[in-house]
Image (cartoon, helix red, strand yellow):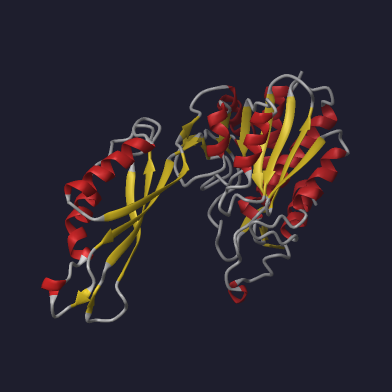
Amino acid sequence: MSDTLKLTEELINRQSVTPEDGGCQKLIAERLEKLGFKATHLRFEDVDNLWITHGTSGPLFAFAGHTDVVPTGPLEDWNTDPFKSEIIDGMLYGRGAADMKGGIAAMVVAAEQFVEKNPNHNGIIAFLITSDEEGPSINGTRKVIEYLNDNDIKIDWCIVGEPSSDKQLGDIIRIGRRGSLNAILTIKGIQGHVAFPELAENPIHSASAFLAEISSIEWDQGNNSFPATSFQISNINAGTGVENVIPGAVKLLFNFRFSTELTEDDLKTKVTALLDKHELNYDLQWKLSGQPFLTNTGKLVDAACDAIKTVCGIETDCSTGGGTSDGRFIAPTGAEVIELGVSNDTIHKVNECVNVDDLETLTIIYTNILEQLLKN
C-alpha cells in the first residue's frame, strides 16, 4: 500500500463533516513536524486551520486544501460506510475521498518525499489547511489570509488540491474562477382577498415584467478566459399557502456568476436601476461569495502543465469553469493560484470515490512541480 493511499484512508476514517476537522490537521502536522516543518494551529470560533512551513526564505509555495466534508446524505443509499474507507475494483470509497482528502494526502506525501531528498531546498513549502471550505467559508482560509497579511507573509505560488480533473487525471487544471454574487430580493405588495383584487396589490404580478427582463439580459459576452456572466434565480417564495389570499410579498434568491468583464458594483447598479425602472417597492440584500480571479500565465501554470505532460503524457486544458473555491481568498494577495486534483465525477455524491492509482500519480505530479520550482 502506497503512503498516499494509506494516508487518504486514515483521513477518510476521521469524521469531519464541516466545520469539524476530526483530528485530520493534527495528524498532518505530526507527520510533517518529523521532517522539520513548523506548525501554527489557528482556531477561529468553531473552525480549525493549519499553517505549516518548511524553509525560511525565498519564494513561498503553498498547498491549500480542506479537511471538512459535506454531509453523507442517507446512509442506506451508500454501498459502504462513508467514514470507513474501502477499496472495491480499484476505487477507494468514502466521504471526502475525492473532495478532497485524497488531494491532501498526495500533497503531504509529495512534500515529505521532496524534503527528504532536498532538505536544503530553495524557498519555503507551506500548507494552508482549513475545516471551513464546505461551510460558510468565514473562519477558514479567509481568516488565515488575514493572519498572513498581518504577519507580512506572502504566498507566491499556490496549488489548491480541489478535484479539477474530468475524464482522466490532469486533463483539466483550474487557472481561475468566476465571481459569485448572491442576492435576497423582497418585492412588497399588499395582502388581500383574491375576490377583491382592487383592495390588494399582488407582488408576483408586479414583479413579472421585471423578472422577464432581468432573465433575458445579456450581461456580457465573456472573454478569452471566462464564459459570459450568468444570472439564475434559485428560489421564489410567496403566499400563505392557501388559495384565497393574495400574498403581501414575494421573496427571490438569485445569483450572478460573473466574469472579469463586469464588477460587483456594475451588477448591483444595473439590478437596482432595473427595479426602479419597474417602480417596484423592494428590499435588496447582497452577499459576495468571491471575486473572479485568474492566473493564465506564470511559472506555476508552466510547471503544472509540464509536470502533467511528463507524468501523464497529455496536454492539460486550462479552465475557469465550475463553482468557487478557497482560491478566491488567496489570489487577491497577488499569488499565482491554480487548482489541480483528482477527478470530480463523484464529489458530494453518495458513494464518493477516487481511483487508487490516481492518488499515487497525483503525488508524482505534485513532487515534479516542487522540483521545478524549489529544487536547488
Q: Position of residue 304 (x, y in %)?
A: 60, 30
| Image height of 70 relative to 53, above or below | below
Q: Position of residue 139 (x, y in %)?
A: 62, 47
Residue nearest the viewer, comparing 305 with 176: 176
Q: Quadrant of residue 56?
A: top right
Residue nearest the viewer, comparing 68 with 224: 68
* Quarter placement of the C terminus: top right
Q: Residue furthest front?
A: 199
Residue nearest the viewer, comparing 138 with 5: 138
Visible in this render: residue 365? no
Q: How many marks?
A: 0
Q: Position of residue 127 (x, y in %)?
A: 71, 37
| Image height of 85 relative to 130, above or below | below
Is 176 positioned to the left or the right of 128 in the image?
A: left
Write the residue at 78% across / 55% down: 23
Is 192 positioned to the left or the right of 56 in the image?
A: left
Q: Quadrant of residue 337?
A: top right
Visible in this render: residue 182? yes
Q: Residue furthest left?
A: 198
Is 258 positioned to the left or the right of 143 in the image?
A: left
Q: Position of residue 44 (x, y in %)?
A: 68, 47
Write the residue at 76% across / 20% down: 57
Is 317 positioned to the left or the right of 235 in the image?
A: right
